[in-house]
Amino acid sequence: MEAKSLSAIPETMLIPLWAKATEQNRHCPILVDKTAADIISKIDYDFSRFRNATMSQVGCCVRAALIDREAQQFLTQHPDAVVIQLGAGLDARYQRLGQPVCTHWYDLDLPEGIALRREYIPESEHNTYLSLSLFDETWMEQLAQQHRPTLIIIEGVLMYFDRAEVQAFFTTLCRHFDRATVLMDMLVYWGVKHSKRHDAVNKTDGKNVFRWSELHSETLETWHPHLHLGREYFMSDHDQGRFPFLMRLLYKLPFFYRRGNQRIIRLEIQP
């Protein structure tokens, strides 16, 4: 296939793709993603601009690996589950997990993202795509009506929205689902409004701004009585010694550990 040039596709979609593809060159990779390595060879884009973005490269892989682990555990317990990945971009989690047994796996993104996704990651009988905004309640109604254990994955997305939008989104989820599990990442607390200091995002077109994080993940429980914090991972605990030396030293300070760490969160929606 001839390399494809990108225009309307957000460049931030390419950062995790690059990170996972690059990880395949490691002797002991944090994450194995052959699909990412295949896709990156077919896209006409100067990925060398990210070559010094060590924190992002390692961070994207740690983030994905932790969510993969939680998703696999959920599916082992609930093989009849319905799964939806919001803002899926070019992430191949369904393939990375070995096309796990489930009732159905949906990947959702905006039309331009889904159009690109369909070129590189074909749909299948149990994995189909939804061309919608994550705020569109259509997908919530569709999944809730199936009355199955529900897993909602939101990776690398919510930090681009305002706090009021994120809070309203979770309130809407709780209105549609009596029970569901949400796997998501929480931006580094100090990262809000500081996209220009991000080692990879600052190499893109500059239109992407981080808008939301919470210092304490438990804050989300105050948004709705049915939201409960199930588990929280601090990513510096799982980098396998790959983050830069100075950052690893700083993470030993409790004040920096909480404010300078990206987190993976499992939320439970239940009465």
Image (cartoon, grey):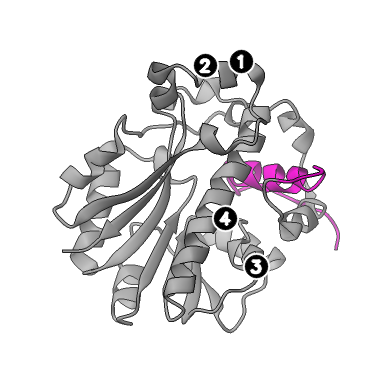
Tell me how far mark 3 sits from mark 2, CA to CA.
36 Å
Badge 2 vs badge 1, beta-carbon distance below 8 Å:
yes
Determine whether the residue tagged by mark 3 lies in a helix, strand or loop. helix
The label number, if any, that marks residue 95 in the structure image: 3
Tell me how far mark 2 sits from mark 1, CA to CA.
6 Å
Q: What stretch is highlighted in magenta?
A: 1-29
Q: Position of residue 115 (x, y in %)?
A: 60, 64
Foreground residue among 54 and 201? 54
Mark 4 crowd level (few <14, some 14–19, many ≥20, 10 Å Cα) = many
Mark 3 crowd level (few <14, some 14–19, many ≥20, 10 Å Cα) = some
Which residue is identified by label 2?
Answer: 250
**Front position among marks 4 and 3:** 3
Which residue is identified by label 4?
Answer: 89
Q: Which residue is drawn at 45% across and 46% down?
A: 157
Quadrant of res 55: top right
Q: Where is residue 268 in the image (x, y as percent from the top left)?
A: 29, 58
Which residue is identified by label 1?
Answer: 246
Quadrant of res 56: top right
